[in-house]
Image (cartoon, rainbow, N blue to C red):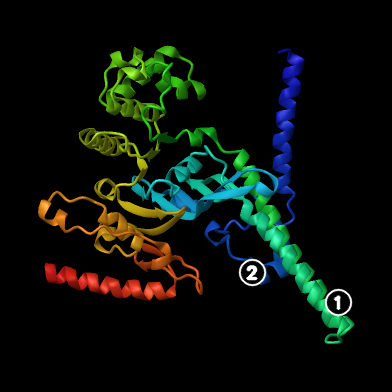
């Protein structure tokens, strides 16, 4: 490529970045630095929006760089997922439809913590992990890593603009009919119309500012920051390229990140292999020459060679034999302590997650239905789906195994959300459950019963 072409391409890239930066600065209404994404699904307060002076003060608070939350750093929250939505769209025209793979999922992972995400196949666990590592562009919500926003979706903001306009048109039509019928005077009509338009315009300005900020953040994520997040994929066969040697597979991430020294890369590969219990000679071999457990160790080495701080483990033991599973779990446990890793452990086996994880979130049909510490979840399993998963755990006792009753979860039979929709409620300190008011009362009585039974057994 000639120098002239190179200069022109560089100028176009700089112009694109500058335009995005200016868009974020020229927004007429900013997002308050105290604005929490956990509240982004609630309508803006009218006092904030109707007061012109407050609005002018907020203009100076427009973020000129990617959004950052110091409170996450102070609370040692390494990852915060806020109202994550991930939809997939298929077809076109009248045949176009959407699949809600993940719908309104929120959780936080502390530094050094192992957070378990449990649920049946197809509930959205893997999609959540892939969204965090930016393999998917999220539909709505925000993802923060070490206080920095690394993922942002704008669907909710776009819908808020759409429905604000619909509500405004409906209100204007009602006022117009009231004027024609003589229910209000012309002066009252004009005054209310002006107030409603002002409120609607303020809401739209807020949402447009948020959209501009989200797009700016999403296109300016620091690659050095993202390098600290690595993923161990579910299938140890399909996740390794059969035409590449083990050394090429493991060192590929280093080369992408700009580490070109072959001798240093080879040394890092050897150290990663030895860390997962493999030897240097394996570096020149191909994936088909290894067993399932060895392939999974290679996948772990590929993630560890980047020296990550946060590791997403997507069912790393589901395709392995029972004896190999224990080896991989013990290996991950040792690596967690040795490297100070924080983990998101995705699985469908609650018995494994109880041993390995500090806190557990139970996921069903794209939503988190229950979230608690490992001991608390097994002590007070409240949601019917959690009970269903627990009833599927086999026990190494032939006498009790004969009498084990498998609980089947049917949402239509277990819940009645026709009157009141459920929301995630903290029913005990640190114990959250998806329920409405009537269910919360029922679960509170159930907690008392479980505690009394535990005292009697003790």
Quadrant of residue 306 within the rendered picture = top left
Q: Nearer the viewer, residue 329 or 18?
A: 329
Q: Would you say 442 lies left or right of 400 here?
A: right
Residue hosting label 2: 45
Tell me if I can see residue 76 in this picture: no
Q: Nearer the viewer, residue 202 or 59?
A: 202
Q: What is the x, y in percent for residue 114?
A: 33, 46
| Mark with earlier residue (1, 2) | 2
Judge the density around disc 2: few (<14), some (14-19), many (≥20) Cα neighbours within 10 Å. few
Can residue 166 be seen here? The reply is yes
Toward the viewer: 151 or 127?
A: 127
Give the quadrant of the C terminus: bottom left
Residue under label 1, please give it: 190
Q: Hey, which quadrant is residue 318 in on the image?
A: top left
Q: Contact, CB < 8 Å: mark 1 with mark 2?
A: no
Gap between marks 1 and 2 measured at Cα: 23 Å
Left or right for 346, reference 254:
left
Above or below 54: residue 289: above
Along the viewing direction, whichever of 360 and 59 lies nearer the viewer: 360
Q: How far across and how far down the image is residue 71, in percent?
A: 48, 54
Quadrant of image for the N terminus: top right
Q: Residue at x 49, y 16 (%)?
A: 260
**Residue 95 screen position, x and y as percent:** 65, 47
Indicate the secondary structure of the residue bearing disc 1.
helix
Residue 185 in the image, given as x and y percentages of width and height: 87, 85
Image disc number at residue 235: none
């Amino acid at each position: 490529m000639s120098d002239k072409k190179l200069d022109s391409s560089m100028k176009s890239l700089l112009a694109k970045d500058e335009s995005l930066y200016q868009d974020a600065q020229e927004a007429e209404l900013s997002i308050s630095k105290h604005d929490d994404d956990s509240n982004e699904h609630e309508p803006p307060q009218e006092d904030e929006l109707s007061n012109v002076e407050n609005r002018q003060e907020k203009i100076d608070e427009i973020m000129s760089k990617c959004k950052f939350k110091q409170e996450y750093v102070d609370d040692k929250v390494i990852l915060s997922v806020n109202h994550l939505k991930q939809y997939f769209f298929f077809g076109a025209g009248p045949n176009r439809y959407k699949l809600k793979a993940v719908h309104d999922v929120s959780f936080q992972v502390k530094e050094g913590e192992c957070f378990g995400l449990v649920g049946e196949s197809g509930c959205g666990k893997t999609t959540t992990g892939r969204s965090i590592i930016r393999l998917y562009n999220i539909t709505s919500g925000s993802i923060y890593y070490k206080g920095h926003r690394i993922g942002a979706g704008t669907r909710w903001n776009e819908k808020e603009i759409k429905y604000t306009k619909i509500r405004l048109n409906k209100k204007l039509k009602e006022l117009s009919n009231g004027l024609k019928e003589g229910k209000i005077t012309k002066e009252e009509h004009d005054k209310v119309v002006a107030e409603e338009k002002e409120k609607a315009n303020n809401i739209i300005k807020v949402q447009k500012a948020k959209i501009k900020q989200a797009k700016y953040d999403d296109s300016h994520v620091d690659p050095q920051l993202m390098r600290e997040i690595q993923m161990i994929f579910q299938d140890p066969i399909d996740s390794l390229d059969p035409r590449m040697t083990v050394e090429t597979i493991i060192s590929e991430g280093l080369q992408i990140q700009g580490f070109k020294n072959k001798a240093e890369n080879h040394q890092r590969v050897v150290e990663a292999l030895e860390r997962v219990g493999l030897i240097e000679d394996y570096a020149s071999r191909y994936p088909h020459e290894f067993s399932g457990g060895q392939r999974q160790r290679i996948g772990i080495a590929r993630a560890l060679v980047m020296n990550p701080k946060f590791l997403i483990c997507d069912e790393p033991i589901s395709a392995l034999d029972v004896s190999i599973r224990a080896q991989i779990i013990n290996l991950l446990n040792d690596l967690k302590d040795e490297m100070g890793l924080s983990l998101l452990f995705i699985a469908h086996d609650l018995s494994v997650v109880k041993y390995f994880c500090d806190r557990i979130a139970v996921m069903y049909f794209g939503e988190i239905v229950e979230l608690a510490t490992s001991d608390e979840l097994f002590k007070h399993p409240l949601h019917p789906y959690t009970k269903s998963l627990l009833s599927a755990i086999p026990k190494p006792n032939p006498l009790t195994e004969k009498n084990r009753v498998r609980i089947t979860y049917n949402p239509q039979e277990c819940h009645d959300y026709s009157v009141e929709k459920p929301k995630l409620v903290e029913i005990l300190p640190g114990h959250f459950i998806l329920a409405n008011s009537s269910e919360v009362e029922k679960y509170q009585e159930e907690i008392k019963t479980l505690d009394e039974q535990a005292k009697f057994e003790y």
